[in-house]
Image (tube, helix red, strand yellow):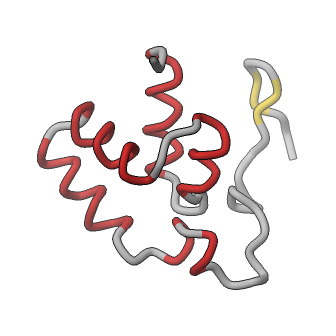
Amino acid sequence: MLSEIDIDRIIQMAWEDRTPFEAIKYQFNISEKEVIQLMKKEMTLKNWKKWRERVQGRKTKHLSLRDEGVNRFKCSRQRNISGNKISKR
């Protein structure tokens, strides 16, 4: 059973372009299909449809489709989070 905090984090990770479904599977042990079901349950239908359209066929959401040069889960320009503060570059 996932906590509200886990559900919130899974939704964040699912919306992020560079976070593959495999990272969600590794961290929370739920499959891509289960992520899709969770998103449908937790979101409004309109937002879920936007999300599905966005992630379908997106190379960065599946490790097997990624270019070999992409070896991270986040954008290099994304700030690091340290505790509750956003660290400076």
For the residue pair 14 and 64, the one nearer the viewer reads as: 64
Residue 58 falls left or right of residue 38: right
Residue 64 falls left or right of residue 38: right
For the residue pair 84 and 22, the one nearer the viewer reads as: 22
Residue 76 falls left or right of residue 53: right
Q: Position of residue 33 (x, y in %)?
A: 36, 52
In which image quadrant can residue 38 be found?
A: top left
Q: Position of residue 83 (x, y in %)?
A: 79, 20
Write the residue at 23% across / 42% down: 40
For the residue pair 81 and 4, the one nearer the viewer reads as: 4
Write the residue at 46% across / 27% down: 8
Write the residue at 23% across / 58% down: 50
Q: Position of residue 66 (x, y in %)?
A: 63, 79
In which image quadrant can residue 41 be found?
A: top left
Seen in the picture, residue 51 relative to 66 is either above or below; the reply is above
Seen in the picture, residue 4 relative to 74 is either above or below; the reply is above
Write the residue at 52% across / 65% down: 61
Residue 82 falls left or right of residue 7: right
Task: Give the total number of marks visible in the rendering.
Answer: 0
* Residue farthest toward the right in the current orientation of the protein: 89
Quarter in which the N terminus is drawn: top left
Q: Position of residue 5 (x, y in %)?
A: 51, 18
